[in-house]
Image (cartoon, rainbow, N blue to C red):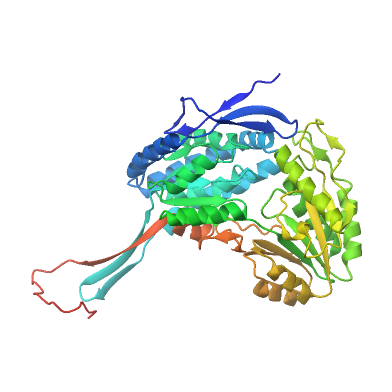
Amino acid sequence: MSEIRAISHHIGGEYWSGQSDRTGDVYNPATGKITGKVDFASVSVIDHAVDVATRAQQEWRNASIAKRVQVLFAFREIVNARKEEIAKLITAEHGKVLSDALGEVTRGLEVVEFACGIPHLLKGSYSESASTSIDVYSMRQPLGVCAIISPFNFPAMVPMWFFPIAIAAGNAVIIKPSEKDPSPVNLIAEFWKEAGLPDGVFNVVHGDKVAVDRLLEHPGIASISFVGSTPIARYIYEVGTKNGKRVQALGGAKNHMLVLPDADLDLAADAAVNAGFGSAGERCMAISALVAVEPVADALIEKISNRMSSLKTGDGTQGSDMGPLVTAVHRDKVASYVDAGVREGATLVVDGRNPDVNGAAEGFWLGPTLFDHVTPDMSIYTDEIFGPVLSVIRVQSYDDGLALINRHQYGNGTAIFTNDGGAARRFQNEVQVGMIGINVPIPVPTAYYSFGGWKNSLFGDTHAHGTEGVHFFTRGKVVTSRWLDPSHGGINLGFPQNR
């Protein structure tokens, strides 16, 4: 029997040595076995972490930008050299295949590299002699202690959307990763210490709603960054802002892929399979609704079905194409949507409920699933399923497809597949979605652009990383300065005027 690991908080540069009244089970989704016990933070543990981070931030904010960037560069080199270690932890606790886990870490590193260039983005502006003998200039300064609440589906990449920029800007960070796969962030905390980051600038607390609510309420927390489902994102935004915090809360998605009759159907079929079933569909940028403009649906479904037949579902360490879902509870929830789709009258083209898997029978398995003749009133269309379920909705025209996408409550990501440049240009202008792919199925922006959706996919005004991320983790000041010459200007009680 394998040893069950104890997983605890990392506060002030060291692992917490106290006792926890509550813990959570951590599973290997490919075997169904418990591999770890993670401590759940109490209110007092959160308060301790905030105190430690507050003290550390007072010194870190005064470190030179050059010093901060040196630490960022060192951290980047460590993560890049040891990214396979992070990827193995992701696969062991989340279940995604190793190549996907490694790709996750690599995309997160892009934000670290972006943050290494933060001196340019922290530059203010300067206007000499805006008025007679008066200069005006601006600066950006850190917020203080910033909290990050991250989801299970990207235990390394999503936190890396936020903390490199927050730290580079002079803030301290407290991150609460998902209790389902907590270990990758603990290893990242060790890498920060090795890179020379002062103790207390990067802290990890584990837990559930108790920890989240205390972070939302604590007066020492300046900002909250969150990625997760829409109901929780709305809660995070409302409670966080009520308590005076700056909040960016990225919510759920139902990403549509519009396929026009002139599209390359082989390219579109490859894209639908890759974007629909990668990471077992547990991606906020997964394509889950394929909108086929007739007469292409039959041919497209045949091509997709043929590709699905070659996919291997199994243990992510054994050369499989798609791994298990993260927990048994989540697997059962996704399977219930497949049941509902059949019950509501959709055509089940490929049934993934009893897959032939390369792995232990106790794993949390659900194979790739394909529905046809899905209508907008069915739950498999209206809801975010967050699993390997692809629904095909048939429409008669581009206008019908666009209207369908724009009516949906979510506006995270979308894609169009076409060889018509005019149609693509019209789509990017008219679709009410935050991130758009043109013949690209997963339009995740590079690190120097910002990530975020529209409508119920985002609460708050600021997207993740890029220049919007820099602005989120800093505050602006404007200074109006006058250094008097030997002749005094005298007393004047009138309202100041530019001269």
Q: Which quarter of the figure has residue 449? A: bottom right
**Residue placed most toward the observer, 498 or 146:** 146
**Residue placed most toward the observer, 448 or 479:** 479
- In this view, the residue farthest toward the top is 1
Q: In the image, residue 288 lies at what x, y percent? A: 75, 57
Task: Examine the rendered structure and indicate whether residue 455 appears above or below residue 314.
Answer: below
Q: In the image, residue 442 lies at what x, y percent? A: 70, 57
Q: Is residue 199 left or right of residue 210?
A: left
Task: Examine the rendered structure and indicate whether residue 168 appears above or below residue 136.
Answer: above
- Residue at (66, 27) in percent of width and height: 35
- Residue at (82, 48) in percent of width and height: 368
- Residue at (68, 55) in percent of width and height: 285
Q: In the image, residue 79 lies at what x, y percent? A: 56, 39
Quadrant that contains the C terminus: bottom left
Q: In the image, residue 25 lies at what x, y percent? A: 63, 31
Task: Examine the rendered structure and indicate whether residue 216 appears above or below residue 45.
Answer: below
Q: Is residue 284 visible?
A: yes
Quadrant that contains the N terminus: top right
- Residue at (46, 45) in percent of width and height: 215
